[in-house]
């Protein structure tokens, strides 16, 4: 068993190393699920086979020692060499391969359940959600807000809240579901959404947008100020960055392809889409620097991961810690 355990750990290290070096794409949910099953198997084997066998061996040793001491006492020998307690401890001790598998099962199970059904941490990798979220923000995502989903296959088994306009949502990227994206929900199923001349419209009405007083948002990486606006979706206000003089380039119309592409119309002024049932239209708050539904289409309900709500750490700026909208 020790050799098998060493082989399993070797495979795990090779998988993680290849993932880190970019040789293949990892799936942490699947990895955690497999680790839970493997350590569970070791835990069951330890509880119902290995531990009882070690306890039986220790009991046998203790009985034999007691019998030997009794025989020597019958012959008048009271002082007997040997420390049976130390030998019992050696027999009862878990071998390393059980300590590093069965011993880790409760911890891995707790992490698996917490991450799958309650809260999951994410790191913001890009600036598409500036100014709401900055590169390097470590955030928490509520996994049950939109319903309880089975891990790995992401199938919803219990309904909860429906996504609302203005929610910051983590979802599996429709073009590659192994990648998680984060954007803001701007349109719900049945909505007609437009983004024309840097202005967002919902069902024919302009979404309220007010520019904040100068100098605007200061980006430390580029050391520049950007025009910052307050936008209101429903009853939720949030900040966005937009350059009124800029105009997104969507590429040749023939190259814009995604499911329900026929629901969208592209022009030099912008894009207008009718959101199909069971889908959502999401955009980044950094409107001029966000690859979102304008470019790759709608997000289906089955791709939803959860609702982002809290920055729990930013090692470059501790003031970032706290809830956000």
Image (cartoon, grey):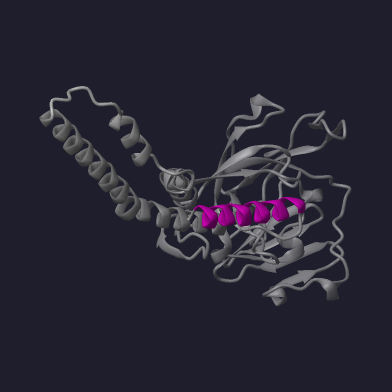
Q: Is residue 147 visible?
A: no
Where residue 66 sits in the image (x, y, percent)? 18, 35
What range is drawn magenta here? 2-21
**154 or 234, which is in the foreground?**
154
Look at 28% across and 42% down and name the residue there: 58
Look at 42% across and 54% down and name the residue there: 42
User: With respect to residue 315, does 247 lie above or below?
Assistant: below
Q: Does the magenta stretch include residue 211?
A: no
Where residue 33 sits in the image (x, y, percent)? 50, 57
Look at 62% across and 53% down and name the residue there: 10
Where residue 98 sits in the image (x, y, percent)? 44, 47
Where residue 94 sits in the image (x, y, percent)? 40, 42
Position of 229 compared to 10: left or right? Answer: right
Q: In which quarter of the image is residue 61?
A: top left
User: With respect to residue 73, does 142 lie above or below?
Assistant: below
Q: Can residue 166 be seen in this view?
A: yes
Look at 63% across and 38% down and name the residue there: 138
Q: Main secondary structure of the magenta part?
A: helix
**38 or 191, which is in the foreground?**
38
Q: Which quadrant of the figure contains the C terminus?
A: top right
Position of 131 compared to 321: left or right? Answer: right
Q: Quadrant of residue 231?
A: top right
Position of 58 compared to 25: left or right? Answer: left
State the residue lying farthest toward the top: 79
């Amino acid at each position: 068993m020790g050799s098998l355990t060493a082989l399993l750990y070797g495979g795990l290290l090779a998988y993680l190393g290849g993932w880190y070096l970019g040789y293949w794409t990892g799936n942490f949910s699947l990895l955690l699920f497999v680790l839970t099953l493997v350590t569970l198997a070791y835990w069951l084997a330890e509880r119902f086979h290995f531990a009882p066998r070690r306890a039986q061996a220790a009991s046998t040793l203790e009985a034999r020692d007691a019998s030997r001491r009794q025989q020597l006492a019958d012959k008048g020998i009271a002082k007997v060499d040997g420390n049976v307690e130390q030998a019992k401890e050696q027999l009862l001790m878990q071998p390393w391969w059980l300590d590093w598998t069965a011993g880790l099962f409760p911890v891995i199970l707790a992490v698996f359940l917490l991450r799958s059904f309650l809260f999951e941490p994410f790191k913001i990798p890009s600036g598409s959600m500036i100014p709401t979220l900055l590169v390097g923000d470590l955030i928490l995502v509520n996994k049950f807000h939109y319903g309880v989903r089975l891990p790995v296959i992401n199938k919803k088994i219990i309904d909860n809240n429906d996504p609302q306009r203005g929610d910051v949502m983590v979802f599996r990227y429709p073009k590659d579901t192994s990648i998680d994206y984060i954007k803001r929900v701007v349109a719900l199923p049945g909505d007609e959404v437009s983004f024309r001349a840097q202005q967002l419209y919902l069902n024919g009405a302009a979404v309220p947008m007010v520019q904040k007083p100068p100098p605007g948002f200061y980006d430390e990486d580029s050391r520049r100020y950007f025009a910052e606006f307050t936008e209101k979706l429903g009853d939720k206000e949030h900040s966005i960055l937009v350059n009124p003089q800029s105009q997104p380039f969507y590429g040749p119309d023939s190259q814009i392809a995604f499911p329900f592409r026929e629901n969208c119309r592209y022009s030099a002024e912008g894009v207008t889409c009718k959101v199909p049932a069971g889908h959502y239209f999401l955009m980044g708050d950094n409107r001029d620097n966000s690859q979102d539904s304008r470019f790759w289409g709608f997000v289906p309900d089955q791709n939803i991961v959860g609702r982002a709500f809290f920055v729990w750490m930013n090692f470059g700026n501790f003031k970032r810690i706290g809830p956000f909208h």
